[in-house]
Structure formats: structure tokens, C-alpha cells
Image (cartoon, helix red, strand yellow):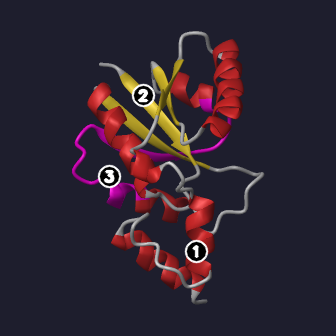
Amino acid sequence: MKTAIYPGSFDPITNGHLDVVRRAAALFDRVIVAVAENAEKRPLFSSEERAAMVRTAARGLRNVSVEQFDGLLVEHARRKKVVAIVRGLRAVSDFEYELQLALMNRKLVEKVETIFLAPKDEYTFVSSRLVKEVARLGGDVSPFVSREVREALRRKLSR
């Protein structure tokens, strides 16, 4: 069984992320969406909240599971017997950073490949950071996230 891992902070999960999850689920027997703890970021949502939102968004995708992790991604991937790390690319500007990560990961664990997937054109400009900014300013984020994520953003930002 070929297993891939799709890591990210998913703060919050967007329709672009979900599109990449669906694409990966069509290519692999099993996809683990790994909600990362990143000490360099100050997320709006806790890792538990982010994982719950991803689970809700990915419901119905039978070969997709969601888990939280911290530490080195390739070590987590090795423990899970993953053959590929899935990374989403929205624009050329993402590529340089993502390539550096892929090369470092390959150096650390040679047997795990990195696969780049592009979301649908309509999501290429969408990022969690922009969604949070639009939501903070009272804008409509409904084209970019699920109803559950919109409600979670509304609750979190109204505090």
C-alpha cells in the first residue's frame, strides 16, 4: 500500500488545501494529512482545532486520515512508512522554498520522494494567511473555505 503524507499548518484549511488532498487521494492508496506544530508560527487555531477542521473538510475521503505531529517531518514519515511527501504549489514563488525543503528531506531520508501538486487555478492565490486577513477585516471568505471553517473564523475573531 502506497502512503503519502501532506504536511502543513492548515491555519485554517482552505479549499486549495482540500483540492490538493483530493488530488493526492486519487494518486495514493492512503494519504495522511499531518497538521504540524511550528514553533516559528503563531497560529490562530490550536493544533487540535486545526486537525478537527481538516477532519471535517476531508470527511468522505475514505483513504485520508488526519493526525497532528511535531518534530522532523521526514522522521514522522519514516515511522509511518510513507513513500511520498505531498506539497502544494500555488505559484512560481513557492517553488524555490519548496525545492529546498524537498532536497533537504531527500538528503535526510533518501527513500521518501516529494511530489508537487498544483491546486485548481481558482485557488492559486488563496493562502491561510490571506483568508485570516480578509476574515479579520470583515470580508467574505466563503469562496475560499468551507462553511465550518468560516464559522470557526467568525467565532475565533469575535473574541
Quadrant placement of the C terminus: bottom right
Callout 1, which amino acid? Answer: Val
The CA distance from mark 1 to mark 2 is 32 Å
Q: Which residue is mark 3?
A: 58
Q: Of all residues shown, which one is farthest toward the top?
A: 110
Asked if 3 appears above or below 47 in the picture, the reply is above
- 99 vs 22, left or right, is right
The CA distance from mark 2 to mark 3 is 15 Å
Q: How many marks?
A: 3
Q: Which residue is mark 1?
A: 134
For mark 2, give the secondary structure: strand
Sequence-wise, the earlier of marks 1 and 2 is: 2
For mark 1, give the secondary structure: helix
Image location (x, y in percent) of residue 58: 32, 52
Residue ID at (43%, 63%): 144
Examine the image and state in which quarter residue 43 appears: bottom right
Front: mark 1 or 2: 1
Callout 2, which amino acid? Answer: Ala
The dot on residue 4 is 2
Callout 3, which amino acid? Answer: Ala
Residue ID at (64%, 50%): 37
